[in-house]
Image (spheres, rainbow, N blue to C red):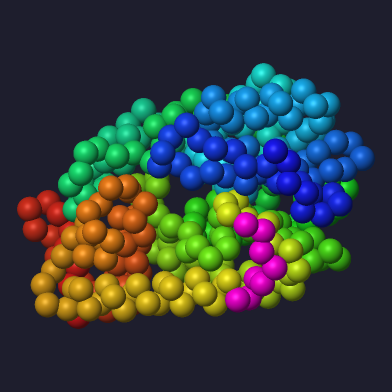
Amino acid sequence: MLEKITDEIEKIVIHSDEKNIAEVNCHLVNGKNGVTLIDAGDYSGHGKKIWENVLNKGIIIEKIILTHTHQDHIGLARWLQETKGIPVYVSEIGLTEMKKYTQSDFKQKFNEFIRKYGYTKKQAVYQDKPGIYDFEPAGYYNTEGTIRIGDDLYEVIWTPGHAPDHFCFYQQEKKILFTGDHIIDNVSPVIGLWTAEESNVLKDYFRSLELIRQYPTEIALAGHGATFYNLEDQVDDIRGKHLHRLEQLMALTSKDPKTAEEVCEAIYGPVEAIGPFMGVLTRLLYLEAEEKLERKEMNGKVYFQAV
């Protein structure tokens, strides 16, 4: 169940009950006062059983620190705080994001937003478990400074893009980096607009990629997939994949205006999940901001065409 990474760090994988939610890596960092847990996993019966088993082994979790507040990372945080007495810490920006998901009209707002950009499949909502956000965390960390994880101080690095409240944690002496969902081994994290607010998040993500590559890293621990040891190579690979997709989008919109869903289907085939659609939409908005695409609104939908 627990995979040893270093003498201090172990990893546990939390599977969701839902098919469209990827398994999440939660990292346990041992310290003299107990374990610091990085992320909690998606809210699920399976996840609860895993944490029950961990705690029954006598492992003392001192606190939980969230890299960001997407549902697969925050999902079990409230349950662990309220039923097991484990304090949860989020960023101050994360608290703002949490409040957005608890708004009574959030689901309607989200569906109206994706419809505007051409989403025609059945109604979809990224976060349909409002209870996981409706609690007061025990504390907050800022966009800079340090935070204690285990027995070591880690630098807090704000890396918006995948999420507005995404943070990485870096230990300079040991050259250890918790990357969350900012950088994942051999995968381009989805850059989406999960709170239904239009912004140029891909531009934010590119900036954050360049920022994080400045940190000499020997061990990178991601929120999904394998631990990796080649941070700069992963940064270059992810950026290259995005640039390739941006070229595709320019070609696909060169003759006729298309919605985000039409572009998505041209690349990936029939749209079965909201993730690929979001990835395409944020790239289209990036190209629009770069004045390489222009939008046209017809029949209440937004279309994009190469300039």
Residue 163 located left or right of residue 256: right
Is residue 227 inside the magenta stretch? yes
Residue at 21% over, 65% down: 266
Is residue 32 inside the magenta stretch? no
* Range drawn in magenta: 226-233
Q: Position of residue 145 (x, y in %)?
A: 75, 57
Residue 190 located left or right of residue 288: right
Image quarter (top left, top right, bottom left or bottom right) of the C terminus: bottom left
In this orientation, which residue lies closer to the viewer: 112 or 42?
A: 42
Q: Position of residue 99 (x, y in %)?
A: 49, 36
- Asked if residue 8 is positioned above or below residue 252 in the image, the reply reads above
- Asked if residue 82 is positioned above or below residue 218 in the image, the reply reads above
In this orientation, which residue lies closer to the viewer: 20 or 252?
A: 20
Q: Can residue 294 be seen in this view?
A: yes
Question: Looking at the rendering, which quadrant does residue 245 occupy?
Answer: bottom left
Residue at 17% over, 78% down: 254
Q: Position of residue 51 (x, y in %)?
A: 68, 29
Which is the main secondary structure of the residues drawn in magenta? loop
